[in-house]
Amino acid sequence: MYQYDEEDQRIVEERAQQFRGQVDRRFSGEIAEVEFKPLRLQNGIYMQLHAYMLRVAIPYGTLSSQQLRKLAHIARVYDKSYGHFTTRQNLQYNWPKLDDLPKILAELATVQMHAIQTSGNCVRNVTSDHFAGVARDELEDPRPWAELIRQWSTFHPEFAALPRKFKIAVSSTPDTDRTAVRFHDVGVRLVENAAGKRGFEVLVGGGMGRTPQIAEVIGKFVERQDLLSYLEAVLRVYNLHGRRDNIYKARIKILVSALGVEEFRALVEAEWEQIKGGPLQLTPAEIARVQAHFAAPAYQQLTAADAVLAGLKLGKNRELGRFVQNNTTPHKQPGYVAVTISLKEKGTPPGDLSDYQMDRVADLAERYGFGELRVTHTQNLVLPDVQVSQLPALHAELVELGLGTANANKVTDLIACPGLDYCALANARSIPVAMELMARFEDIDYQNDLGELSLKISGCINACGHHHVGNIGILGIDKQGQEFYQLALGGSPGHDASIAEVVGRAFPRSEIVGAVEKVLSRYLTLRASPEETFLDVVRQKGLGPFQEVLYPATQRQEAVHADH
Amino acid sequence: MRIIRNGAICEDRFVHVADGVALPETGDVIVSLDRYRELRAALQKRAGQVGVRLRSDQEATLVAPYLAELALVAIEFPGFKDGCGYSTARLLRERFGFRGEVRAVGDVMRDQLFYMQRCGFNAFELKAGKNIEDALNAFKEYSVTYQGAADEPRPLFRRR
Ligand code: SF4
């Protein structure tokens, strides 16, 4: 992974010092809370319902064991002994004290970490594929490009106060997508053209929130050395033309829709003409320097272990078999797999990990790999380089830590935002609904029967829980002070991007889990064979058959329109 | 009024003249772009330097035809969350080669100064009531920058 040099290091240290000064000026009264707010926001510090919240950046989801131990230490010393992994591959602490925050930033800086641009109206922490570098289906490791974008966007002076937040994702898989690249303000896809040359397809204007939108291609093939100048042109057009009069119309997707994608592209091209080939053009030396940081680790030369894997999946130890079946991903290197550690174990809020578990997982990353971990946007962790022969031992250790849940990509591997338990913007709670769902559908054989299925919950229209792109999406709404939940079906964040459609009238808290159960049962009766996924069935049959089981006939007519 | 210019505190020579208010007989003035267009010939004949003040939504291209006649362009920051002016300043410097004073006015506070300077601002009217001496420290807060900008065209990767 990327290692800071002296200059990278100086930046995070100076940031920590700067923030100490800002907090001191806040305490002395020299700056008012309204003036302090944008300063703390640029450091990833929010005011939540009960306390401050600190969001730590984990650039493109890559983390070292040493960094994870530091995160554990911070959780223990400055917080309530746990951290929460988010849908943007970051980590949040929910209970830090303002006075401690500069100290926490200084601690983070000692392990090359920071909270820079994890909030505020700036270019946010860049995200990427959690299997980057090890996935069989990628063109090349996208992380060097994500790191180049990270450096370019860090304290970019021109883009420090954009109309609204700005999220960039980088993916490198031609036939699939694990980064929701089409739901970002800018999606960067590494592609190969007909001549075999690598470059980038640049998509713009995707997003969730109030107006979910699938990004459109504006740059069909941007050459590698031009990536940063192209992005700079996009951001400049947005900074100059994006709306600042209405927070709900300020994202780049609104600008792209208002102008039309052709007009937007023309503006970007005109700006790019002026700066393309200038100092921002990446040099071969810089590309090579950053790529060298992501060179493959010292793998052992092993023989392919497909037969061993198959044996484990069907073996006598059913718990292990299910784990290998669901939580391992094929690896570039023969004899290795990537292992997903599910943070969706029954009884714990999705994405939460205790300080003790963090320390132990850091140990596992060293003993079953090269001391590297990944954070997924589905709020799980990944050990990227596990030898197949070591799977039984690793699994046993994970089970002991309460982290052996074999539900990756299954219905209980759900995403949930913090919701009304923490978030000041929430309409309804997300976590209790998530926990009830996890308990209700706990049976792994039932989950395997259902197959690949994503369920995503947001506590309000801001959609931090990505409900628009859930195969099943749940949105918390407030009806006269009561928590209600809207159910939507058919979303997908991936290659076949689609936005989930609302089935009808929202359900009260006491009925939402039952409603999901009805939908799942209906799916099982509708599908022609187990190969037909839930998403396939929703796409083929539409919402009708699901509405039949969710609403009595009398209600159905009105239900269809009720909550739109 | 005291302002920061070229990294030091100094007394401002310019007077902001609001639209509809009569121009003073002599002395350096800052007027709106509309006013400048209207009184361009008269302002050029008048003794004293002239600056134009841009609203945050007025782009650099609008003032570009007059830059050779202007000593100063002031860019308004209606709130610290409106960063349009950062792009405008860079374009004035980097695209239109403006060498005169580029001044930040409005909601200008210590914590924006570092970015503003990087984008090509060299003068700052601090928001009323803010400690101007203390604000000078802002320019020294970072010793490393990743990007090229108006102050240094080369990104760090060309300097590493
Ligand atoms: S979706 Fe709404 S409730 Fe959930 S974390 Fe985001 S803002 Fe808060």
Image (tube, grey):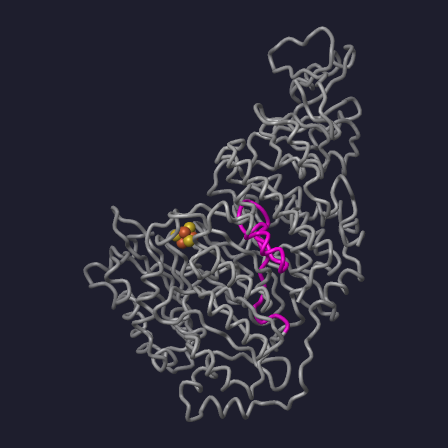
The image shows residue A34 at horizontal and vertical percentages of 49, 35
The image shows residue A168 at horizontal and vertical percentages of 59, 56
Q: Classify residue B13 as left or right of residue A552.
A: right
Q: Classify residue A126 as left or right of residue A493.
A: right
Name the one closer to the observer, B52 or A88: A88
Residue at image point 44% right, 69% down: A343
Q: Residue furthest front?
A: A77
Name the one closer to the observer, A492 or B105: B105
Q: Residue furthest top?
A: B25
Give, as a single range, the part of the protein colored magenta. Answer: A104-133
| In the image, residue A106 lies in the stretch drawn in magenta | yes
Total of numbered circles in the picture?
Answer: 0
Chief secondary structure of the magenta portion? loop
Query: Can you say whether A334 is above or below A30 in the image?
Result: below
Query: Can you say whether A369 is above or below A261 in the image?
Result: below
Q: Classify residue A316 as left or right of residue A478.
A: right
| In the image, residue A72 lies in the stretch drawn in magenta | no
> The N terminus of chain A is located in which quarter?
bottom right
The image shows residue B9 at horizontal and vertical percentages of 71, 24
Q: Can residue A540 be seen at all in this image of the molecule?
A: no
The image shows residue B145 at horizontal and vertical percentages of 72, 47
Q: Can residue A539 be seen at all in this image of the molecule?
A: yes
Name the one closer to the observer, A410 or A404: A404
Query: Can you say whether B32 is above or below A521 in the image?
Result: above
Query: Which quadrant of the figure has residue B22?
Result: top right
Residue at image point 60% right, 44% down: A238
Name the one closer to the observer, A340 or A100: A100
